[in-house]
Amino acid sequence: MLQAYVLIETEMGKARDVTTMVSGIDGVTSVAAVNGPYDVIAVTEAANVDELGSVTVARIQAVEGIIRTLTCPVVQL
């Protein structure tokens, strides 16, 4: 299973709505609102890179109120 952190920048005042919407997406295991350059962080799981792309591009980036995302796949060291 491939895990990734998706760092999400939202429009002003939209972090709560984005957190709620993203938490209902299949493949998202947890979501938290945070302070800093990003407003929300989502943890995702996918079977492969293509499925991860589907979760981030087709589902997460389609949520209204999101300005941009940065996907950080987890690596095993």
Image: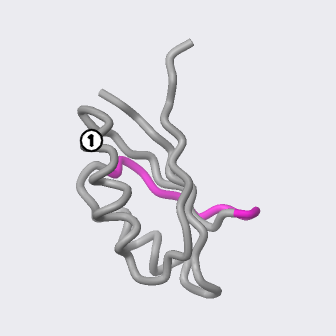
Does 57 sit left or right of 74 as displayed?
left
Q: Which residues are magenta?
A: 28-37
Q: Is residue 8 above or below residue 47?
A: below
Farthest residue in the top direction? 77
Image quadrant in which the N terminus is located: top left
Residue 36 belongs to the span the image colors magenta: yes
Image quadrant in which the C terminus is located: top right
Q: Main secondary structure of the magenta part?
A: strand
Does 20 sit left or right of 12 as displayed?
left
Residue 24: give x, y in percent of width and height. 29, 64
Q: Which residue is located at x 53 percent, y 61 percent?
A: 69
Residue 22: give x, y in percent of width and height. 38, 66
Q: Which residue is located at x 47 percent, y 54 percent?
A: 42
Q: Which residue is located at x 54 percent, y 41 percent?
A: 72
Residue 56: give x, y in percent of width and height. 37, 56
Q: Is residue 15 above or below residue 55?
A: below
Query: Where is mark 1, residue-wise?
Result: 50
Q: Residues within 10 Å of mark 1 (few under 14, many from 20)?
A: few
Q: Amino acid at mark 1?
A: Asp
Residue 29: give x, y in percent of width and height. 35, 47
The kind of secondary structure element at disc 1 is: helix
